[in-house]
């Protein structure tokens, strides 16, 4: 009989502990760290995807409706549509096959980051100059797009 009372007391204690535990934290953490083949990538606050999502207001020096040719100059006017806006450039999804599309996408994000992020490695003037210089060939465009992509991914 004494063993039965000890068992009942332990069972009551376990029920009490489980009923007082906040299971909300457990389910959230379990969803956050799911094992298996579920792949999600958390994009940073400096990527073109972030800027095109409009989650943060753009710097006043570079309105969303500004055209690429107006911001980056006449050489950009020759390469891209005359009415391509910065918002459209940041949101492009044809950058896998077209290196110049990738370049303008990453350059737009880099320009926005240069104005909005204190520790961004390039100034606005450098971003504009590098884009104009990279438009001369696919190889230079590819190299600069990769460099800016790395800077945009590493930025906070």
Image (tube, rainbow, N blue to C red):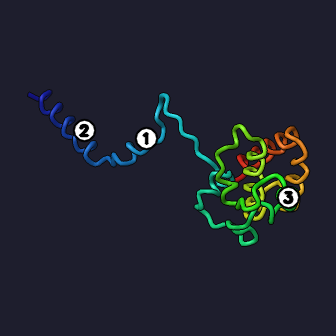
Tag 3 secondary structure: helix
Quadrant, the C terminus: bottom right
The residue indicated by pointer 1 is: 31
Please give the name of the residue rendered at 77% of the width and 41% of the height, measured from the top-left corner: 99
Local crowd at mark 1 within 10 Å, few (<14), some, or many (≥20)?
few
Tag 2 secondary structure: helix
Nearer to the camera, 42 or 103: 103
- Tell me if I can see residue 64 in this picture: yes
Please give the name of the residue rendered at 64% of the width and 50% of the height, measured from the top-left corner: 44
* 3, above or below 153, in the image: above
The residue indicated by pointer 3 is: 128
Q: Residue furthest bottom?
A: 60
- Tell me if I can see residue 117 in this picture: no
The residue indicated by pointer 2 is: 14
**Residue 14 location, x and y as percent?**
24, 38
Query: As drawn, is 36 to the left or to the right of 131?
Result: left
Q: Earlier in the sequence, mark 3 or mark 2?
A: 2
Please give the name of the residue rendered at 38% of the width and 43% of the height, measured from the top-left corner: 27
Cα separation between marks 3 and 2: 65 Å
Q: Nearer the viewer, mark 2 or mark 1?
A: 1
Please give the name of the residue rendered at 66% of the width and 60% of the height, measured from the top-left corner: 87
Q: Quadrant of residue 146?
A: top right
* 15, above or below 50, in the image: above
Cα separation between marks 3 and 1: 42 Å
Q: Earlier in the sequence, mark 3 or mark 1?
A: 1
Q: Nearer the viewer, mark 3 or mark 1?
A: 3
**Residue 131 location, x and y as percent?**
85, 52
């Amino acid at each position: 009989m004494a063993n039965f009372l000890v068992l009942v007391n332990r069972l009551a204690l376990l029920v009490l502990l489980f009923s007082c535990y906040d299971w909300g934290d457990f389910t959230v953490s379990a969803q956050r760290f799911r094992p298996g083949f579920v792949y999600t990538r958390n994009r940073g606050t400096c990527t073109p995807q972030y800027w095109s999502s409009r989650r943060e207001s753009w710097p006043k020096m570079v309105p969303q409706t500004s055209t690429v040719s107006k911001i980056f100059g006449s050489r950009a006017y020759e390469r891209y549509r005359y009415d391509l806006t910065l918002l459209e450039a940041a949101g492009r999804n044809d950058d896998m096959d077209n290196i110049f599309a990738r370049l303008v996408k990453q350059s737009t994000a880099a320009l926005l980051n240069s104005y909005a992020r204190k520790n961004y490695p390039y100034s606005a003037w450098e971003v504009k100059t590098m884009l104009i210089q990279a438009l001369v060939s696919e190889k230079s465009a590819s190299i600069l797009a990769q460099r800016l992509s790395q800077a945009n991914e590493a930025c906070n």
